[in-house]
Amino acid sequence: DAKTTQPPSMDCAEGRAANLPCNHSTISGNEYVYWYRQIHSQGPQYIIHGLKNNETNEMASLIITEDRKSSTLILPHATLRDTAVYYCIVSSTGNQFYFGTGTSLTVIP
Amino acid sequence: DAGVIQSPRHEVTEMGQEVTLRCKPISGHNSLFWYRQTMMRGLELLIYFNNNVPIDDSGMPEDRFSAKMPNASFSTLKIQPSEPRDSAVYFCASSLAWGQGIEKLFFGSGTQLSVL
């Protein structure tokens, strides 16, 4: 079962930052937070992951709270192509992913 | 790299027929995964291989499903006999360093299976 809670849907205006929250209050010390997204009719795509520290890459930023019980994925300047279902996954090394239902993000022109 | 390649892209078959789905992982990746996605159940892991060896097949729904990985560049998922409830999108994914701290999956485009 998924160990995370995400809002089922969100909207964001094109060009604005999209902030997608995720609660993982039962996360263990050795579990990472992963974010994937799935654009319609495609396979899921890796975005970013982190353990304790905030992370940034060319796609997004990941902010993890100090107690690690929640995190936020930030898409700094959302475009229409960012419309997708975003999955927050908690897992330790070598263990399987449970994708859950994710957040359906719609970027509005 | 061409990414993970799955075939066919779409498959329509009749109940009772055998269905074979194919996957070519990214060259050099040592782990391969088969997932199934439906509206009701979302993305479910069926089986995964590490270095061509099946490690966890607990997600395989029943004996009608079987998966093989005869070499590092090819895997099949077979359903025999197929049933309408098997209709779903089947994804294959591969990973370079699964179990080494960077659990990054690369997914194929999926096979849309319809069993009539």
Image (cartoon, coloured by chain):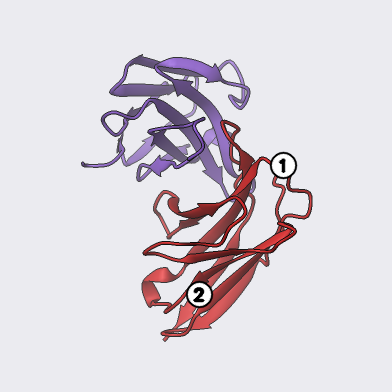
Chain colours: A red, B purple
Residue A82 horizontal/vertical position (percent) = 42, 70
- Is residue A107 placed above or below B10 in the rendered structure? below
Of B70 and B36, nearer the camera is B70
Residues marked 1 and 2 touching at CB (< 8 Å)? no
Residue at image point 39% right, 34% down: B94
Of B59 and A54, nearer the camera is A54
Residue A1 marker: 1
Q: Secondary structure at mark 2?
A: strand
Rendered-image quadrant of the N terminus of chain B: top left
Q: Work out whether residue B16 can be spotted.
A: no
Give neighbour class at mark 2: few <14, some 14-19, many 20+ (Cα, 10 Å): many
Residue A106 marker: 2
Of B101 and B29, nearer the camera is B101
Q: Horizontal placement of A97 versus B48: left or right?
A: right
Q: Horizontal placement of B115 versus A42: left or right?
A: right
How many angstroms separate mark 1 from mark 2 (CA)? 26 Å
Q: Work out whether residue A29 can be spotted.
A: yes
Q: Chain of mark 1?
A: A
Of A100 and B38, nearer the camera is A100
Tell me the amino acid under the disc marked 2: Thr
Residue A45 horizontal/vertical position (percent) = 42, 52
Residue B106 horizontal/vertical position (percent) = 39, 42
